[in-house]
Image (cartoon, rainbow, N blue to C red):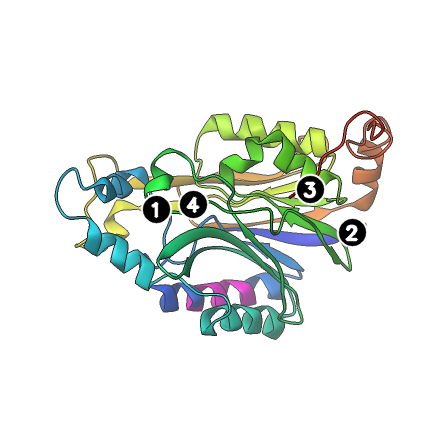
């Protein structure tokens, strides 16, 4: 690993508007690149909206016909390959950064929760679909597969990631460990303090830098035809953060506002943390324990 400056973006989607959200990504990517950062992480399902339980509950049809809301989300999801994916690649290439974005991805009639990582050359280097949607998310997303449970080599280290609560799946985490992850991406919609307990544990277990970009949404930003259950103004409070391999915070958490967190990741910090514990290296027993990703 080499020293690198990274960015964790906490921004609000232009809700249910794929094109405008991608334009917002372009502007923020320019800001990140201008700061000297080489990697930018955006939140889970940033394109075009995370399905909060405050509106996704309507998809069960308990209080009327929810098909128009699902149809709107599907229409504003992106396809791969497709022009929107190409546009994200062009943004990464234009600004010369690694760009990691959460997106609703449509394939035929099924929507998936995807983590997309584009290289500075504009190539889609990692395409991962969330393995198991959580709770109300199963009304929205299909099940992912083992694709993307890997790292990609960059000039500054091995980068990989998991989405939200699949970070609490031990074998999914180890799939990244055994491919040498050094910068671990954990985009999420979990805006709880409990999530930070998990982040600190993952950083210490992985002995990797952890970036968690969290969903920030306000009720006042939703289109009028998307019904929301009662609650406060914040549908998602954020809580984005960047952590060191010892579980300490390098930046954040950031709550209740948009913003970009930056941190300088020092390679010696990672190597020092792995002196005593390396989960897939000298503290592993492959002769006893083995993970096979199907």
The boundaries of the magenta stretch are 23-30
In depth, the one of 238 and 157 nearer the eye is 157
Q: Indicate the position of residue 194 as horizontal and vertical percent values.
A: 49, 25
Q: Label 3 vs label 1: CA separation?
A: 26 Å
First in sequence: mark 2 vs mark 1: 2
Q: Are marks 3 and 2 in contact (CB under 8 Å)?
A: no
Residue 255 appears anywhere in the view = no
**The disc label shown at residue 24, or none:** none
**Residue tagged 2:** 3
Q: In the drawing, what numbered circle is on residue 176?
A: 3
- N-terminal of the pair, mark 4 or mark 2, is 2
Residue at image location 26% in from the left, 58% down from the top: 71
| Residue that numbered label 4 is attached to | 215
Tell me the quarter of the picture where residue 120 sits.
bottom right
Disc number placed over residue 140 in the picture, else none: 1
Query: How far separated are the C-alphas under marks 3 and 4?
Result: 23 Å
Earlier residue among tags 3 and 2 = 2
* Dot 3: element: helix
Q: CA distance from mark 2 to mark 1?
A: 39 Å
């Amino acid at each position: 690993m080499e020293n690198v400056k990274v960015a964790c973006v906490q921004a609000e989607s232009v809700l249910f508007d794929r094109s405008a959200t991608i334009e917002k990504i372009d502007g923020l990517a320019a800001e990140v690149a201008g700061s000297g950062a080489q990697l930018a992480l955006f939140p889970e399902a940033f394109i075009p909206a995370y399905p909060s339980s405050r509106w996704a509950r309507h998809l069960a049809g308990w209080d009327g016909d929810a098909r128009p809301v699902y149809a709107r989300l599907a229409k504003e999801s992106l396809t791969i390959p497709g022009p929107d994916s190409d546009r994200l690649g062009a943004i990464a290439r234009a600004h010369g950064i690694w760009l990691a974005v959460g997106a609703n991805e449509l394939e035929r009639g099924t929507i998936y929760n995807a983590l997309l990582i584009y290289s500075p050359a504009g190539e889609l280097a990692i395409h991962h679909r969330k393995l198991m949607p959580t709770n109300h998310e199963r009304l929205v997303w299909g099940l992912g597969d083992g694709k993307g449970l890997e790292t990609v080599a960059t000039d500054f280290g091995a980068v990989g990631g998991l989405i939200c609560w699949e970070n609490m799946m031990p074998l999914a985490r180890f799939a990244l460990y055994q491919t040498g992850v050094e910068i671990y991406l954990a985009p999420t919609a979990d805006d709880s303090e409990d999530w930070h307990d998990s982040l600190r544990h993952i950083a210490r277990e992985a002995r990797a830098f952890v970036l968690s970009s969290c969903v920030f949404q306000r009720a006042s930003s939703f289109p009028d035809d998307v019904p929301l259950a009662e609650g406060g103004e914040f549908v998602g409070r954020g809580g984005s953060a960047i952590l060191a391999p010892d579980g300490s915070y390098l930046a954040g958490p950031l709550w209740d506002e948009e913003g970009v967190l930056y941190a300088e990741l020092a390679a010696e910090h990672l190597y020092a943390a792995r002196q005593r514990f390396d989960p897939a290296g000298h503290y592993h027993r492959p002769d006893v324990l083995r993970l096979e990703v199907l």
